[in-house]
Amino acid sequence: EKILFVIQKSGPFAGLFDLPGGRIEFGEDPNQALHREFIEETGMDFRSMIQIDNFSAVTRVPALNGKPGYEFHQIGLIYSVEGLHDLEDIQKGSLKCEWVDVRSLKKNAVSPFVWAIIHGENACTK
């Protein structure tokens, strides 16, 4: 009933719960990218992964501090991971992590992408 979330430090979703992950770098497959991103952000790794679904969310980020507004489009391959374990030889992840009961989440506490996933819909928020 709980999901491991990271808390974003910066960007349009700073302070919000989000899923560990990021972009696939040149030459990586999704498995390699998820392992790398998971290690970087959480300081943990996992034994195996199973793809659940694909989601996307578009969020209009307003102008702030003289920077123009923009649309932030997230596209994600969503996986369930098994065999989660700490990596002792790697320093802590770059983001704070927290196990959260998804039933307790409020819309203003999560990224629009996470909200779309929880509610099983691709989202466009303005």
Image (cartoon, helix red, strand yellow):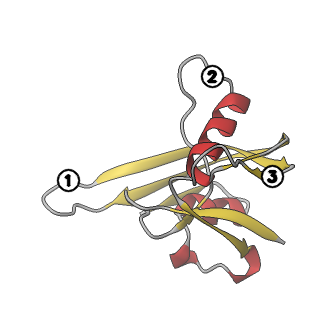
**Which quadrant does the C terminus fall into?**
bottom left
Provide the residue designation for mark 3.
Answer: 84
* x and y, in percent, of residue 33 in the image: 64, 32
Q: Residue at x 54, y 26 (%)?
A: 25
* Residue reaching furthest to the front: 89
Gap in angstroms between the C-alphas marked 3 and 2:
21 Å
- Disc 1 residue type? Pro
Q: In the image, 23: left or right of 14?
A: right
- Disc 3 residue type? Leu
Q: Residues within 10 Å of mark 1 (few under 14, many from 20)?
A: few
**Of residues 95 and 5, which is closer to you in this image?**
95
Q: Which mark is residue 68?
A: 1
- The secondary element bearing badge 3 is classed as loop
Q: Residue at x 38, y 59 (%)?
A: 10
Q: Which mark is residue 28?
A: 2
Can residue 125 be seen here? The reply is yes
Who comes first in sequence, dot 3 or dot 2? 2
Gap in angstroms between the C-alphas marked 1 and 3:
40 Å
Q: Residues within 10 Å of mark 2 (few under 14, many from 20)?
A: few
Q: Judge depth for marks 3 and 2 and give the one in front.
A: 3
- The secondary element bearing badge 1 is classed as loop
**Which quadrant does the N terminus fall into?**
bottom right
Do labels 3 and 2 touch, CB within 8 Å?
no
- Disc 2 residue type? Glu
Q: In the image, 71: left or right of 64?
A: right
Q: Which mark is residue 29?
A: none
